[in-house]
Image (spheres, grey):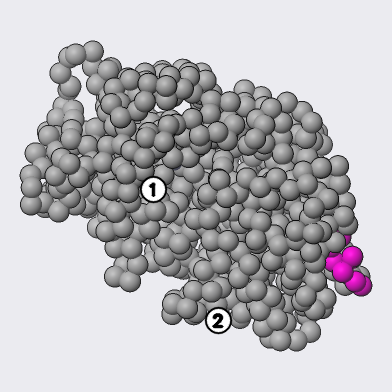
Amino acid sequence: MPRVTRSLASLIRVCIAVSGATLSLAAAASPDPAPPASHGLDVGGIDRAVAPGDDFFRYANGAWLKANEIPADRSSYGTGAQVAELTAKRTADLIREAAKTSAPGSDARRVGDYYATYMDEATIEKLGLAPLQPALQRVDAIKDRKDLARALGAALRADVDVLNSTNFQTPNLFGLWVAQDLDDPSRYAPFLLQGGLLMPDRDYYLDPAAPMAAIRGKYQQHIAAMLDLAHQPDPKGSAARIFALERRMAQAHGGRAESEDVLKGNNHWPATEFPRRAPGLDWTVYFDAAGLAQQRTLVVWQPAAVTGLAALVASEPLDTWKEYLRFHLLDQNAGYLPRAFVTEAFEFYGHVLNGTPQQRERWKRAVDDTSFALGEAVGKLYVERYFPPAEKARAQEMVRNLLSAFAVRIDQLEWMAPATRVQAKAKLAALKVGVGYPDRWIDYSGLEVVRGDALGNAERAQLFEYHRNLKKFGTPVDRSEWAMTPQLVNAVNLPAMNALNFPAAILQPPFFDPQRDVVLDYGAIGAVIGHEISHSFDDQGALFDASGRLRNWWTKEDFAHFEAAGKNLAAQFDRYHPFPDVAVNGKLTLSENIADVAGLAAAYDAWRLTLQGKPARGAAGFSGEQLFFLSFSQSWRNKVREPALRQRLVTDGHAPEEYRADTVRNLDAWYQAFDVKPGTKLYLAPADRVPVW
Ligand SMILES: [Zn+2]
């Protein structure tokens, strides 16, 4: 995950179902949250003037969309954001309580101290740049390329993730992901990813389109402003040189779609081969400084980029690299520096990149940052208060029903070869489903949290996380480890671990609510559960067998059928135009769109199973079937500012919420429920509907 300045501004994007993608705790929050509609459907949010078959998203949500504006401190707002807001508020209360009541040395105390220190702006103002001086002096002391390699190696962090949190961005030259070896799932391997850019993607540096060019101008102004605040000489000249260097790095980078291609990424390089394959960087010094000297083999995810970036380490002036490193230190740590730095960082990352007019209140950023540094320690406090065992049991029962529905679907697939079907069932049986929180918590006793040292706390937390990951080498792979924190409103499939995580925070209204008919739960969280299960069996899931080995377990014919179905769905999404000049990228979002359709279909089946042959109950003038689809669409309710939406269309593997909600048009049951006829805008002839599963 990017460091705090950007985790405030650009949202952490994960491989999720729910607009969770847009609504992690990192998402900005409104000052006075409207509570999410709970205990039933939001009937008042429906716009009956819209025909369901013309625009189902606006039919289900139109009145709400008209009545609500995106709060000034957010780049987007909707159901997920409301739930995240409530969760953040509860989490903040728990954290403040922990500071007062917990025993010294406990994880709860660490949480409380971390938060209180972040909140202590007076001390931060008083300290000024002093906490960053040692790091800046280390940059000043760089005398040659060996020193440079050492500095770059020491900056390596475990801040990227290829398959689980799908985070491909790191501000450091490279990022490390420690995960099971895709060729040998019994051991952990180090994965090295491209990095070094502060804007969200290479397109921001290279795309000639006018909006991108304008952002580039503002980015250079931002670099100069940060350097100026830190009293660096020649801020404008420096900014131009730093930008030019980053632009060359962007030219070496692979694009997002390429990074997501597992088959292109699984490149095992012997450590001894790096000097030959990627000359320019002193790799021995780099690996030594990074604590990776013992690793004989590393997986190089974007080989051309690693080669290109290493070459730049040799070819670009040493002084430019030093300017670059100083700016990155300032930028990445802006959240722990005096207000002027915080404001400038928000101006660019929040305002320019996401269109958010106003920064969130500090306490909300403090919750976010504490959750980032001590995620499971915060999560433990959260579930003790808000996720009782009865709720966990109820969610587990829903998961079982979804798994049963999915098993039936696999049995009924006509196109799948019998041998593949056997393996699919085996994979389903081996799926490890985590509900609410992990079985074992991370022990933070090795992390020193010092009152009054906000920047040092953040640095130590990142290093703690890095060393925690390095310690995995040589130990058995732990499939029970979570990729998300319990207080995150999100869900995820961990393909190589053949595991799912459903954090406690998404298991609450309006996704999941004990005080209403289960049909609404199946339409909302049920579709999320189905979405995550289906990832184990989609184009990505087909690449990993039950043990997590990268081994395509489908026959050629199975794959051909799946690809053909996928092409139709990609074409369906290519036709959506959020703006006249830009369409949804059907190929980039294909896996997620397949998971949405499959998840919704499995959730529908699972709900029918709970009826045990009895007719569905209706409510509020809607049939049970209508309630199911309305609940689904309302769970996707969301508004996004234009710059943020444009960013997502480039960098996000998920389609915008509106089109995800409209995927109901691929299910026959939706046509029956709302009597949707040919001639309406969402109508698809039966042959054009893409059920996939
Ligand atoms: Zn997904």
* Three-letter code, disc 2: Gly
**Is 605 on the left or on the right of 623, as rendered?**
right
**Residue 128 inside the magenta-drawn segment:** no
Dot 2 lies on which element? helix
Magenta region: which residues?
143-151
* Residue at (62, 23) in percent of width and height: 439
**Is 380 on the left or on the right of 276, as rendered?**
left
Position in image of residue 435 (x %, y %):
51, 26
Q: Nearer the viewer, residue 357 or 263?
A: 263
* Residue at (60, 70) in percent of width and height: 251
Write down the quadrant of residue 345 in the picture.
bottom right
Disc 1 target residue: 590
* Residue at (62, 45) in percent of width and height: 266
Disc number for residue 279: none
Position in image of residue 434 (x %, y %):
53, 26
Report the number of numbered marks: 2
Position in image of residue 293 (x %, y %):
86, 46
Disc 2 target residue: 217
